[in-house]
Amino acid sequence: MMAGWGGLFSSDMAIDLGTANTLVYVRGKGIVLNEPSVVA
């Protein structure tokens, strides 16, 4: 069942769910998303 998830996780991408902003970093491209975090 988990074999299909292998391509989903990679060491080339990082997600930071910070308190103020959510950042997505891609190796070779840098930060590709920097958006305010939404707290309900």
Image: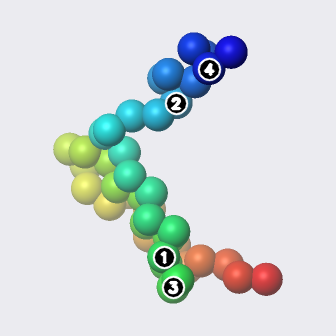
Do labels 1 and 4 touch, CB within 8 Å? no
Q: Alpha-carbon distance for marks 2 and 4?
A: 10 Å
The local crowd at label 3, few if under 14, some if 14 to 19, many if 20 or more residues have their Cα within 10 Å, is few
Q: Amino acid at mark 1?
A: Gly
Q: Residue 24: x and y, percent?
A: 42, 58
Instruction: Report the amino acid beneath label 4.
Output: Met
Q: Quadrant of the N terminus?
A: top right
Disc 1 + disc 2, Cβ < 8 Å: no
Nearer the camera: disc 2 or disc 4:
4
Say if mark 1 contacts mark 3, CB within 8 Å. yes
Residue pointed to by mark 4: 2
Give whichever of discs 4 and 3 has the lower sequence position. Answer: 4
Q: Earlier in the sequence, mark 2 or mark 4?
A: 4
What separation in Å lies between label 1 and label 3 (alpha carbons)?
6 Å
Check disc 1 and report the residue beneath it.
18
Identify which residue is drawn at 25% across, 45% down: 27
17 is higher (above) or lower (below) than 27: below
Query: Along the polypeptide, which appears first: circle 1 or circle 2?
Result: 2
Q: Amino acid at mark 2?
A: Leu
Question: Disc number at residue 4?
Answer: none
Q: Is residue 40 above or below residue 28?
A: below
- The CA span between labels 4 and 3 is 33 Å
Image position, residue 6 (x, y; %): 50, 22
Q: Is residue 36 left or right of residue 25?
A: right
Q: Where is mark 3, residue-wise?
A: 20
Report crowding for label 4: few under 14, some 14 to 19, many 20 or more residues within 10 A (C-alpha).
few
Q: Label 2 neighbourhood size at 10 Å, few (<14), some (14-19), many (20+)? A: few
Secondary structure found at label 3: loop
Q: Secondary structure at mark 4?
A: helix
